[in-house]
């Protein structure tokens, strides 16, 4: 049975709070990607560059979205308790080559027709044992830097992608994602989307987040558990973005993740099904 723990954690309503959330909940990472992609749909004319005065030439090369909203997610991956958090959002895309958002930076390295290959720089904020009572005694998973790469192929409104991320520090693990995203405008103002993906991880990552060592078992009371490499999670999401005018937009997204394999069987996990929701309001410059 899910328990909802709400509250507007003012001290965590910062960019750091959002990146912590993104780094530990893959469905929200997809949301960060999607809102940037949605704003590139040519549904409405872009803002007039001349409004920016003498900086118009430089700013005209950037697609910037500023906004904020609220998200509801499990307190940690595998929790049956939820947290509701207000969050800011910043996304900037330069000449369709560099995109910066709270998860880090994505750089397009090669593009040929429908195929694109890009590099990714980001960070994983880890996990704190005081994030939930069930984690007491497990210790913290330290933060780490992420370097990764993504290959994507577009087929009309659909994009099939494969992504590989290596964490340096923290878990020192590797995560891989294979998925599909579909984005389609239904009108001049409304864009809908859907996505599905599977995530696999190596033994280091799985043991850091889902394993229980003998020492952790003695401190926490959880059974000892060795988590091996393999499938970790499947994610599904639907979204809608409504352009109020050429600048203002509202985006809602609902998703569900299902823990698999050794992650699902871990004593750290209380609930295998991980729902989430998000509502954002953004302004496109």
Image (cartoon, rainbow, N blue to C red):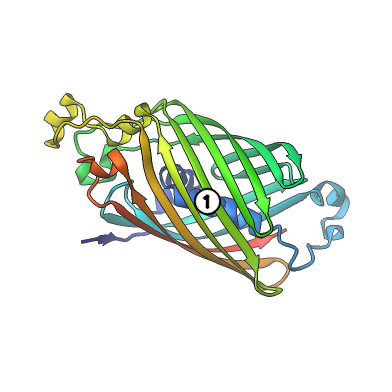
Give the side of residue 80 with respect to residue 19, left or right: left
Say which residue appears at 31% left-offset and 57% top-offset.
82
Residue 23: % across, % down? 45, 42
Q: Is residue 241 above or below residue 137?
A: below
Q: Is residue 207 above or below residue 43?
A: above
Residue that numbered label 1 is attached to: 30
The quadrant where residue 140 appears: top left
Residue 21: % across, % down? 43, 47
Say which residue appears at 66% left-offset and 60% top-offset.
157
Q: Which corner quadrant holds the C terminus?
A: bottom right
The quadrant where residue 125 appears: top left
Q: Which corner quadrant holds the N terminus?
A: bottom left
Asked which secondary structure carries label 1, the reply is helix
Q: Is residue 84 visible?
A: no
Residue 79: % across, % down? 27, 50
Say which residue appears at 51% left-offset and 44% top-offset.
178
The quadrant where residue 144 appears: top left
Q: Is residue 207 above or below residue 56?
A: above
Give the side of residue 36 with respect to residue 212, left or right: right
Say which residue appears at 42% left-offset and 47% top-offset.
25
Residue 262: % across, % down? 28, 38
The residue furthest front is 155
Mark 1 Cα-neighbour bin, 10 Å: few <14, some 14–19, many ≥20: some
């Amino acid at each position: 049975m899910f328990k909802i723990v709400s509250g507007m954690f003012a001290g965590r309503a910062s960019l750091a709070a959002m990146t912590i959330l993104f780094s530990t909940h893959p469905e929200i990472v997809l949301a960060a990607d999607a809102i940037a992609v949605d704003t590139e749909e040519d549904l409405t004319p872009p803002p007039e560059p001349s409004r920016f005065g003498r900086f118009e030439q430089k700013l005209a090369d950037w697609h910037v979205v500023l906004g904020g909203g609220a998200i509801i997610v499990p307190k940690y991956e595998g929790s049956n308790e939820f947290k509701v958090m207000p969050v800011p959002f910043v996304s900037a895309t330069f000449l369709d080559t560099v995109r910066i958002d709270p998860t880090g930076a994505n750089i397009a390295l090669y593009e040929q027709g429908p195929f694109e290959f890009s590099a990714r720089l980001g960070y994983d904020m880890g996990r704190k044992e005081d994030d939930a009572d069930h984690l007491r005694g497990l210790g913290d998973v330290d933060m780490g830097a992420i370097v990764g790469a993504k290959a994507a192929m577009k087929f009309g409104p659909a994009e099939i992608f494969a992504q590989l991320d290596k964490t340096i520090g923290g878990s020192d693990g590797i995560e891989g994602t294979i998925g599909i995203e579909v984005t389609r405008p239904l009108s001049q103002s409304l864009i809908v989307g859907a996505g599905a993906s599977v995530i696999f991880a190596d033994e280091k990552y799985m043991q850091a987040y889902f394993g229980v060592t003998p020492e952790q078992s003695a401190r926490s009371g959880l059974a000892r558990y060795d988590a091996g490499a393999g499938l970790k999670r499947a994610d599904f999401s639907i979204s809608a973005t409504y352009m109020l005018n050429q600048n203002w937009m509202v985006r809602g997204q609902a998703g569900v993740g299902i823990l698999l394999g050794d992650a699902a069987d871990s004593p750290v996990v209380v609930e295998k099904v991980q729902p989430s929701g998000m509502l954002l309001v953004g302004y496109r410059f």
